[in-house]
Image: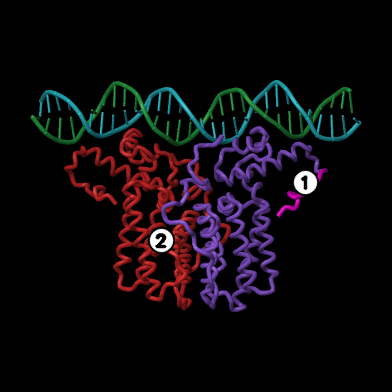
Chain colours: A purple, B red, C cyan, D green
Amino acid sequence: MTAESSRITARDGVRADARRNRERILVAARAVFAEHGIDAPMATVARRAGVGVATLYRHFPTRDALVRGAFAQQMETCARALTEALAAPDPWQGFQQLVETVCALQREERGFPAAFVAAFPESTSEHAQSRQRAERDLTTLVRRAQASGALRADFHPSDLAVVLLAHCGLVTALPDDGAASQRLVAYLLQSFRTDTANKPLPPPTTLTLRSLPIATDSTGPSRCPDPR
Amino acid sequence: MTAESSRITARDGVRADARRNRERILVAARAVFAEHGIDAPMATVARRAGVGVATLYRHFPTRDALVRGAFAQQMETCARALTEALAAPDPWQGFQQLVETVCALQREERGFPAAFVAAFPESTSEHAQSRQRAERDLTTLVRRAQASGALRADFHPSDLAVVLLAHCGLVTALPDDGAASQRLVAYLLQSFRTDTANKPLPPPTTLTLRSLPIATDSTGPSRCPDPR
DNA sequence: TCTTAAGCGGACGCAATCGTCCGTTTGGGC
DNA sequence: GCCCAAACGGACGATTGCGTCCGCTTAAGA
């Protein structure tokens, strides 16, 4: 989105320590969000970053701003993936790549899924238009894949949201090695194709129904009593 | 599970008002959990039930106990669905029915999905064995469906957990009319069949990517500022 | 009706998190 | 090296949720 976020060089009228702290905070936020979910206390992020709470709040006035800042890079990766998908020679390949890339991102960067879901309703001025563009591109991608005959005709662009949200839920619920996630993606992609040739799936989860490390709240791997 | 919960008759050594309050609390809990997620304050449940907090805690010492109590009926329905699925004449039909029943339950009883996920790791004495039995039955169901030739051979019983958790995530993220949920279930069921005849799907979600009423936390439909 | 113990409810103490205020430190221009 | 505005950090008051304690109420048996 905004290209400035990668300008870590110098002259932008911001003092060096401020810029340094901002980066530290973002790194810390990603780590903490991954460990305890995006509802983790702001103070925890601050401590992890080695800064005071006031500094944290100065850079990111709300938790929302922090979350958005922390995962801006991932969001950008998603946008890039979409562009690349549209550029792919084979429409189906592009479609598949997009789904797999975004899902891989969701499963690798813990905390991102929650942020991803939480970010949906946001209708900020700038983001609104980029979202609109994304939506248009997605529709194009779908139509192209359908025209090529590989994607079933009754697939609806909104189904992509369904897939992404369901996948979010899955990886949020069980932060395992990703076997379950890959399994789900493979199943879904197969059902989207017109010629479902029952291609081989990634190996199933080894987990039994009991032995799932799941917590009540958002992302945290377990009810840990605050490791302060 | 425990059959006593449905014994609302009389003689069980419990005073009438106590029994009445217990029921009121359960009703209130389901309502509140549906509205604000299972992390809603205990006091809110108490107020809704028209009882004091102490009474709430007396009946359900922990939030976990309350959640379990509130959705015991739904859990039982799940168990019954499994039994019925095994009794179905056509193995595939049974398999399909099970998935659809459980998913329908998840989408209809708001708050239940979160409870469902949260309940997984629990290894209580009594529940442990009933879970084990459920697991065995599920495996049987899968094997039978595979033997009949309708269910793909590489389907693994753990895939059922994958489906259920993903579906939980979806309905939790967007508490809409259920179109998305039905869509997902249909896609998945199709990819599980050996002869994927591209049968018609339920209609797609009408939602666009922006316009999703999603909150950061568990189940609540929106960031509502406490309607106390 | 009387008795009594089970049941009730709200006030209270405790803990966690939020977000701000304000005195102190420091980067970087001169 | 000096200066000052920008940046920092921690203490603090406010808010919210938890779970218990204790005096009052009431169901139900005699």
Q: Amino acid at mark 1?
A: Ile
Q: For numbered disc 1, what is the local secondary structure?
A: loop
| Residue A8: mark | 1
- In the rendered image, residue A188, in percent from the top left (x then y), is placed at 52, 67
Residue closer to the observer: B212 or B37: B37
Which residue is painted at 60% across and 35% down in the image? A43
As displayed, is residue A210 above or below residue C1? below
Q: Position of residue A213 (x, y in %)?
A: 47, 49
Question: Which residue sits at x=58%, y=58%?
Answer: B210
Residue A130, horizontal then vertical, whole percent:
67, 58
Inter-mark Cα distance, 1 to 2: 48 Å
Per the image, is A6 magenta?
A: yes
Residue A190 belongs to magenta span: no
Is C7 located above or below residue A185 in the figure?
Answer: above
Q: Assign the magenta stretch its main secondary structure.
A: loop
Task: Name which residue lies at 30% across and 73% down.
Answer: B89
Specify few, some or many for label 1: CA neighbours under 10 Å numbering under 14, 14-19, or 20 or more.
few
Q: Which residue is mark 2?
A: B103
Question: Which range of residues does the magenta coloring cover?
Answer: A1-10
Q: Regarding mark 2 in the picture, which secondary structure is present there?
A: helix
